[in-house]
Amino acid sequence: MTKIDRTDVAILDCLQRDGRMSNQEIAARVNLSAAPCWRRIKRLQEEGVLRGYVGLVNATAVGLGVTAYIEISLTNHHADTVAQFDAFIDAAVEVMECYSVTGQHDYLLRVVAPGIGAVEEFLMQRLLRQPAVDSANTTFVLRQKKHTTALPVQANQPPD
């Protein structure tokens, strides 16, 4: 794990709140001059702490107003079955997130679509036709109560 101090946490906080914030703005907020701030950001990128920068799109504004969570059980856990499922998921643009999970099911997917019919089509015409998939259980989101992309990053050092 990368050693992260309080200044790194402050930099990450700035970038998670506004990825377009300039180095000058970040430096001012974390009480550094521009050059040391830039070096820290560069180090965080090189060490894989900062993975990239994105623009967050409002799904409803672009016609993707339905979110569903789908629990998947595979037919078996052989390497070729998992690889086949992974390839399908990689190609499925509706799938925003896919997690291998513990419990009753093998995977949890977050899917976005323009409507319930599109989710049904994805399930019936594509997902459940995959030889690797044994079953799927779908839950539709009625209303989003909280959504954030900002991680609760803390310095990994002993308390003062």
Image (tube, grey):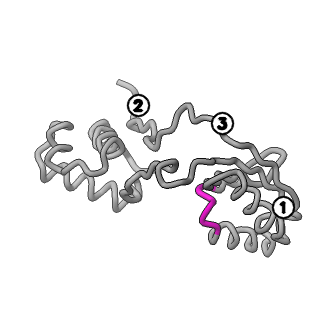
Q: Residues within 10 Å of mark 2 (few under 14, many from 20)?
A: few
Is 51 left or right of 102, judged from the image as shown?
left
Between 158 and 111, the one nearer to me in the picture? 111
Give residue 156's quadrant in the image.
top left
Give residue 112's quadrant in the image.
bottom right
Residue under numbered circle 1 = 74
Q: Residues within 10 Å of mark 1 (few under 14, many from 20)?
A: some
Q: Circle 2 sits in a helix, a strand or a loop, which is it?
A: loop
**Amino acid, disc 3:** Leu
Residue 98 is inside the magenta segment: no
The residues tagged by marks 1 and 3 sit, at their Cα atoms, a distance apart of 27 Å
Specify the quadrant that holds the C terminus. top left
Q: Circle 1 sits in a helix, a strand or a loop, which is it?
A: strand
Is 110 left or right of 74, judged from the image as shown?
left
Query: Magenta segment, which residues?
Result: 92-97
Q: Position of residue 50 (x, y in %)?
A: 38, 54
Which is closer to the viewer, label 1 or label 3? 3
Q: Residues within 10 Å of mark 3 (few under 14, many from 20)?
A: few
**Amino acid, disc 1:** Leu
Residue under numbered circle 3 = 142
- Considering only vertical position in the picture, is 45 above or below 66? below
Residue under numbered circle 2 = 158
Q: Position of residue 56 (x, y in %)?
A: 41, 51
Residue 96 is inside the magenta segment: yes
